[in-house]
Amino acid sequence: LSFAARGFLPLQVRKMVGFVVAVMRGRLPPDLLPRLLADDCMADVPAAPPSFAYLSDCYFDRFEKTNQLQIRPRGRQGFPRGITSPQAQHALQGFAAAIHEH
């Protein structure tokens, strides 16, 4: 999944993913989404684990234009090429097991 925005609240992306997974697994009703998006809603939805979330790109176009400078590096230079650590493998297996009940 990919998300793009001018900014995110703490846990926002992980909770969006957690909501989708909970709906797909039948643990939350899909019609809950409009209520969650209401201004007065303070519902707590499950957050996806942080193990595989990463920031791939940052753009500072407005800042760069205002200050007439350029911030580097840009692009996907830090993009992870594979999951190699045992802790990450274990977290991935746990997340996969939680999503796909066997």
Image (tube, rainbow, N blue to C red):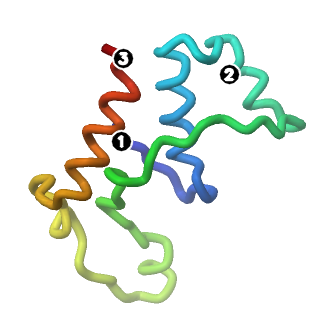
- Give 24 or 67, whichever is nearer the viewer: 24
Image spot of residue 31 (x, y percent)? 68, 11
Side of 54 where 10 appears, left or right: right
Residue sitting at 32 percent across and 51 percent down?
Answer: 52
* Residue wearing tag 1: 2
* Residue wearing tag 3: 101
Q: Earlier in the sequence, mark 3 or mark 2?
A: 2
Residue sitting at 25 percent across and 58 percent down?
Answer: 87
Q: Is residue 19 above or below residue 63?
A: above
Identify which amino acid the numbered label 1 is placed on: Ser
Side of 31 where 89 appears, left or right: left
Image spot of residue 30 (x, y percent)? 62, 13
Q: Secondary structure at mark 3?
A: loop
Classify mark 1: residues with Cα within 10 Å, few (<14), some (14-19) or many (20+): few
- Give 41 or 47, whichever is nearer the viewer: 47
* Residue wearing tag 2: 33
Side of 32 where 2 appears, left or right: left
Q: Secondary structure at mark 2?
A: helix
Image quadrant holding the C terminus, namely: top left
Between circles 3 and 1, the one closer to the viewer is 3
Between circles 3 and 2, the one closer to the viewer is 3
Corner quadrant of residue 7: bottom right
Identify which amino acid the numbered label 2 is placed on: Leu
In whole angstroms, how far apart are the C-alphas of marks 3 and 1?
Answer: 24 Å
